Image: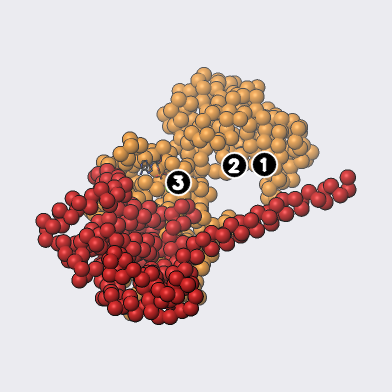
Chain colours: A orange, B red
Amino acid sequence: MSRIELDSVTKRFPDGTTAVRALDLRVGDGELLVLVGPSGCGKTTALRMIAGLEAVTSGTISIDGVVVNDVEPRHRDIAMVFQSYALYPHLSVYENMAFSLRYRGARKSEIQARVAEAARILELEPYLRRKPRELSGGQRQRVAMGRAIVRQPRAFLMDEPLSNLDAKLRVQMRAEIAQLQRSLGTTTVYVTHDQTEAMTLGTRVAVLSGGVLQQVAPPTELYRRPANLFVAGFIGSPPMNLIDARLERGDGGPLVVFGPHRLRVPPSVLAGHSGLDRYLGEPVVVGIRPEHLADAALAGAPPAGPAGGPAPGGPAAGESVIELPISLREELGSEVHLHATIGAAAHAGAAGDGDDVRSLATIVARADPRSRIAEGTIARLVVDAAELHFFDPATGASIRDG
Amino acid sequence: MAAHPGRRPLGPRLRRHVWAWALFAIMIVIAVVMLYPFWYMADNAFRSPGQFDRQSGHSLAGWSELFANLPVASQMLNSTLVCAAAIAIILVVSTSSGFAFAKLRFRGSGTVFLLVVSALMVPLQSIIIPEYVNLAKLGLTNSYAGAVLVYAALGTPFATFLMATYYRGISDELIEAAIIDGLGYERTFLRIALPLSLPAIATVTVLQFIQIWDDLLVGLLFLPPGQRTITAGLATLSAGRTTSIPALMAGSLISAVPAIVVYLIFQRHLVKGLTLGMGR
Ligand SMILES: Nc1ncnc2c1ncn2[C@@H]1O[C@H](COP(=O)(O)OP(=O)(O)OP(=O)(O)O)[C@@H](O)[C@H]1O
Ligand SMILES: [Mg+2]
């Protein structure tokens, strides 16, 4: 049981690559912290520095308040689960799990007891005599976990432990890891590039981009209050729609204007984003989560009867509904994704990723499967304006309080 | 028209068949060319000189002449001792240094490795005289130790190169897993790298065994007559003591057996070792 603290940790490789830049991170006792970010953002490097496999260029790493910068990996008492599992191919499952204890001078009876316990928890008992190559991917993954837990280390480090498994097994193992971690209560740093995995596993999630920490927060906080454009675009699937817009003064309050569309910013949003005042008449990036765009025919309808009637008492309907041509309708069963072309520039390069869809002037709505909006038609979509996000186009930072 | 599409898929299959048979025939020719000398040696080892001239009849005359002129048993033992000692040195040096070159980060590792590999290109004949002078100054000529050291020095560069290449094929994560599991680099080498490199070790052993066992130059130059290896002994045999070809054939046959045995023992690992490290 222990705390891990990173203070302004920087890693520069001999070739000049700065993989991690001034990283501050605190992992609490028993916490499962997920480190997430796109490929090449420095997640593995950060983890390897905690493990002691990579030297720190500057800054300090401490475990339980003791600086471990110069402590050898084997004396840090940390277990690591590698992406490739790195099982010893010439040793049996039992030997793989017993390996570390053996070299730490544990008694034979103790080793047997601990391996048996781990094998029981991980349901590996039938395979103890087998070699790693005689196991399936999921079983190997379990052995890698078992090798970590028999040690009862101060902390677990896991580098994309599920990325070699197929989708279904990944979901299953994800739940098992979460459960295991909770019952053992061992401090864990878990690395993944999969934001869904990050959101479902972490008590807190740290988002990394280009070696720089973007935000650390519990999953819901990350989702509801992303600190900047990167986090907004990275967390959530399909990702948040980010549109270059202008904030303009309207009769009943500020309006978000993009292309021919105008959206009223409700007073509740203004109250929560006092910083918005300074952007009146200025460009902003507005963010709309796909689930906050709904089929107007379904959304406004139920109490008022047939569609089209102005919703009484709500915000001025004309300024929360936008009409967009639908270019694609994707059926997912529980929901449909409507891809719509907007008559304005999408905010380009928000997430810094080349393969980002947002460079196309398209936004995605996550609609009720009962929606009858078809491809090639013009759809009326209601925007839940209370859930709008605003970002400074220059810095990318979220606009909140002045 | 109708027959045409039916015939088309048959073409490539037929061509593959023909190709396979042609390959088979070529292999048989190669096998005959390779094996004929062996058969010739085995056949003529069991003749007397007269029978050899006539190429008919068999006897053990060649063998008795061989044993009368050459201390076969003790020379076989000499060969075995020299081989075993030299290979032991080569393996100890090449596995540990190969591991270091492949998996440890240290200053000058690339340069030193390059130096070691460049030693591969120096032919024995060009350094044999300086080598002799060196060993003479150390007082190591006329003893097993001198020959063993020369063989070890000659074999180590290639063995190191082969081991380093092999260890590079072992994933870094595996080594790091052992480090994190609490082993130092020494024990990681002994417990993880070494057992995993058995195929490469087998390869080095077989190649070096054949090379050292068959070597003539070092054996003749650095070993006194009483400690000669079987290969050197056979050379002296033909150089005067007897001209009996059956006796020479018998000697060659007996000296070829250990190499064949070693090869057969390690053969299974050998193929794996030569192809491993070329991707997975
Ligand atoms: N030994 C090294 N020498 C030089 N640069 C390196 C080294 N290791 C990693 N890098 C660089 O550091 C950056 C971060 O690498 P890292 O492996 O930490 O990324 P990652 O976030 O784990 O990515 P992925 O999700 O693809 O595993 C990359 O740009 C990478 O090229
Ligand atoms: Mg990585």
Q: Secondary structure at mark 3?
A: strand
Q: Position of residue A242 (x, y in %)?
A: 56, 32
Q: Is residue A118 above or below residue B93?
A: below
Crowd around label 3: few <14 · some 14–19 · many ≥20 (10 Å): many
Quadrant where the N terminus of chain B is found in the figure: top right
User: Is residue B119 in view from this perspective?
Assistant: no
User: Is residue A375 in view from this perspective?
Assistant: yes
Given the image, on which type of amino acid does mark 3 rest? Answer: Val
- Considering depth in this image, is B174 or B195 the residue closer to the camera? B195
Q: Is residue A325 above or below residue A216?
A: above
Direction from residue A189 to residue A232 in the image, left or right: right
Question: What label sits on residue A238 in the rendered view?
Answer: 2
Given the image, on which type of amino acid does mark 1 rest? Answer: His
Reading the image, the residue beneath label 3 is A36
Q: Nearer the viewer, mark 1 or mark 3?
A: 3
* Ligand 1 lies under 8 Å from the Cβ of mark 2: no
Please report the residue visible at 57 percent of the width from the left and 44 percent of the height from the top: A237
Ligand 1's quadrant is top left
How far apart marks 1 and 3 lie (CA) works out to 25 Å
- Considering depth in this image, is A319 or B160 the residue closer to the camera? B160
Kindly indicate the quadrant of the structure image that contains residue B98.
bottom left
Q: Is residue A24 above or below residue B137?
A: above
Question: What label sits on residue A337 in the rendered view?
Answer: 1
- Using the image, name the chain to which the residue with label 3 belongs: A
Crowd around label 2: few <14 · some 14–19 · many ≥20 (10 Å): some
Kindly indicate the quadrant of the structure image that contains residue B29.
bottom right
- Using the image, name the chain to which the residue with label 1 belongs: A
How far apart marks 2 and 3 lie (CA) works out to 17 Å
How far apart marks 2 and 1 lie (CA) works out to 9 Å
